[in-house]
Image: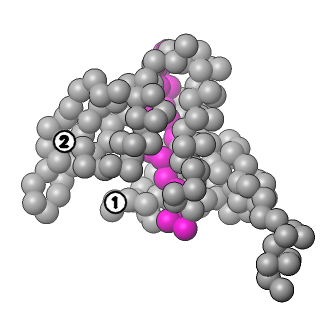
Amino acid sequence: MMGFLSRLFPKRAPAVLDARPTDAAALAAVHAASFRHGWSEPEFERLLADRSVIAQAARAEGGRGRITGFILSRLAADEAEILTVAVVPAERGRGLASDLVRRHLSRLAALGVARVFLEVEEGNRPALRLYSRAGFGEVGQRKGYYPRAAGAAAALVLRRDLG
């Protein structure tokens, strides 16, 4: 019966929309499920209120459902820094992060951004694959940036030119 119903009422793909200040709690929950040290709801409230921050969220059910992923960046002149990308564990491996990054880069380009930077932990293979596929390349390192039980890991500084 379930297969029949899913054919009649297929699951709608998530819609990528601008995040709103009222989304702070949902973004904090997704972030906490994605990182060892998740950002708090008040931190997201501050970010979403900042005019230099661009935030986009993937909402399930064509935009009417819960937030399943998001991306945030901060603008400075003609550059941007991606601050974070997060996807709920149940939705990983389905291309949502790639879609978020692709759409976000298009949005940044439309705003006149020429270069985009980000930092990623050197051992984070899924993130490195994501950013490599999106055209980012390594331009520097911050030694000992990410604390670990067995010693600190470097942050790789990545860059992509938009044009």
Closest to the observer, 28 or 89: 89
Name the residue: 79% across, 78% down: 3
Looking at the picture, the colour scheme in use is: one colour
Residue 160 appears left or right of 25: left
The span picked out in magenta is 72-90
Above or below for 50 versus 41: above
Query: Which x, y percent locates residue 85?
Result: 48, 47
Q: Amino acid at mark 1?
A: His
Which residue is drawn at the image coordinates 56% and 29% (left, top)? 105
Image-based side of 158 in relation to 116, left or right: left
Q: Quadrant of the C terminus?
A: top right
Which quadrant, please, contains the N terminus? Answer: bottom right
Q: Nearer the viewer, mark 1 or mark 2?
A: 2
Residue 154 left/right relative to 158: left
Does the residue at mark 1 contact the one at mark 2 (Cβ under 8 Å)? no
Task: Tell me the distance, in whole angstroms, between the alpha carbons under discs 1 and 2.
Answer: 17 Å
Dot 2 amino acid type: Ala
Magenta-span inclusion, residue 82: yes
Mark 1, residue position: 37
Check residue 154 in the rendering and tell me which mark sits there, or answer none.
2
Element at label 2: strand
